Amino acid sequence: MAGNGAAAPAARALTRVLFAFGAVALVFLGAVYLFAPEIYLQTLMLQPSAADRRPLIVTVFLVAVVLWIVLLGVGIVRRWRWVFWLIVVAFTFSALQIPATVLELAGILTVGVPVWYSVLRALVAVIEMGVGIWMLRLYRRYGVWARDRAAAKG
């Protein structure tokens, strides 16, 4: 096993990557809310209204997602184990988005969102999958949150 200090750079890098990912996600969520709120309407299975492009339920949904991301950020800082495993599972299973996007672009699967959104979501899924695999590798070497196994036991 590596010494106590070997995991610290990996843990810092993991934290930075996850916070950067969360920050980009928040910016993207806000941009979609401002410029393409119909995507939220589609996600919530609501009918668009000419009178109100952003109904209250869409705003509440966005606030709930933002609060969830903030909670995950707290879990990252506090190194909650359940947050680690939730992110690993969610990020690695995001690989399913890639064939789903291919099927959508081929016309086999109908989702009803703009093509740019589907393609962007697939690109994000590739990044998520890479981060998820990296987290699993860090876990095997250093333990949860890339903390040194020896330090965690002692």
Image (spheres, grey):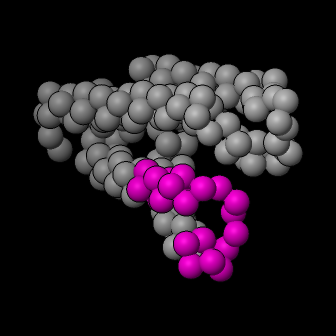
> Which region shows up in magenta?
104-124
Q: Position of residue 139 (x, y in %)?
A: 34, 46
Q: Nearer the viewer, residue 29 or 81?
A: 29
Q: Position of residue 10 (x, y in %)?
A: 22, 36
Q: Is residue 151 left or right of residue 22?
A: left
Q: Image quadrant of residue 146?
A: top left
Q: Is residue 46 above or below residue 82?
A: below
Q: Is residue 2 visible?
A: yes
**Image quarter in which the N terminus is found:** top left
**Image quarter in which the C terminus is found:** top left
Q: Position of residue 74 (x, y in %)?
A: 50, 19
Q: Residue at the location (24% across, 33% down)?
A: 13
Q: Residue at the location (81% across, 24% down)?
A: 56
**Residue 97 among those drawn in magenta:** no
Q: Residue at the location (50% across, 28% down)?
A: 26
Q: Is residue 152 visible?
A: no
**Residue 119 among those drawn in magenta:** yes
Q: Is residue 112 above or below residue 149?
A: below
Q: Residue at the location (34% across, 41% down)?
A: 143
Q: Position of residue 12 (x, y in %)?
A: 25, 27
